[in-house]
Image: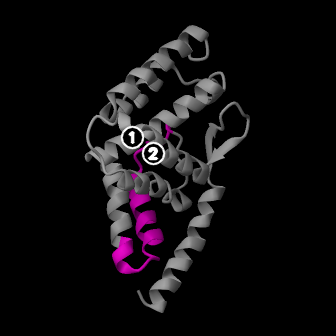
Amino acid sequence: MTTEDLLKQIEFIKEIDKIKYIQRRTKLFSSDRNENDAEHSWHLAMMAIVLSEYSDKEIDLSKVIKMVLIHDIVEIDAGDTFIYDQDKNHDNTEEELKSAKRIFGILPEKQAKEFIEIWTEFEDGISNEAKFARSMDRLEPLLQNTSNNGGTWKEYGVKYHTVYEKKKVIKEGSTKLWNYAEKLIENSVEKGILEK
C-alpha cells in the first residue's frame, strides 16, 4: 500500500463516522433511546460471533462480520428506511448502490471493489454468509421490540402478520433461531404487545 492508499483509507474512516448519526426507529433494549446505525452494526457483529453455531450451513464467520459491519454504511447517503414503512419499499437498492459506490469508492480500488462485493452479497441474500448475516439483522430488532413492550410495533401500529412476514428471513440462515423468533412473536401476541 502506498501513502496515497493510506490517505484514502483515512478519508474513508472519517467518512463512515457519519453512520453514528443515522438514527434507527428501533430503541435500545429496555430503553426509550433510539439506536443508531453504528450501534446496530456492532451489535450484529457480536451476535454473529456468539450465535454462529446456530447457522444451518457452514459459514465464513469473518465474512459475516464484514457484512454486518458494512451493510448499513450506505445509509449515510440513502438514509435508514424503516422495515415496516408502508410508503417506501425497504429494498431501495438502486439508491443504496449509488451510495455504496460513492462511499466505498473513497477507498483504494482493490478495497473498494471488495467492500462493494460484500455489500452486494449481503443485499442479494443468496450465500450462506448472507443468509446468516440477514438473520442477525432481523433478529436484533425483534429482541429489542420484545424488550420494550412492543416498541416500534405499538408506536407505528405494526400488526402480527407484517412482523411475521418480515422476520421469516431468519429461517433462511438458522432454523433454530427462527424457531426461537417464532415463539417470541407468538408470545408477544399473547402478552398483548403485538396485535393480530
x, y (%) of residue 16?
Answer: 56, 66
Instruction: Pick the quarter of the image with the N terminus.
Output: bottom left
Residue 52: give its label: 1
x, y (%) of residue 62?
Answer: 38, 55
> Quick check: is 119 in the magenta stretch?
no
Q: Residue at x 32, y 47 (%)?
A: 129
Against 152, residue 69 (above or below) is below
Task: Specify the amino acid type for callout 2.
Answer: Ile
- For the record, the magenta segment spans 83-112
Marks 1/2: CA distance? 6 Å
Q: Residues within 10 Å of mark 2 (few under 14, many from 20)?
A: some
User: SS class of the residue under badge 2?
Assistant: helix
Rendered image coloring scheme: one colour
Total marks placed: 2
Relative depth, front residue between 137 and 1: 1
* Disc 1 + disc 2, Cβ < 8 Å: yes
Against 187, residue 98 (above or below) is below
Q: Which residue position is annotated with label 2?
A: 49
User: SS class of the residue under badge 1?
Assistant: helix
| Quarter assignment of residue 57 | top left
Q: Residues within 10 Å of mark 1 (few under 14, many from 20)?
A: many
> Quick check: is 97 in the magenta stretch?
yes
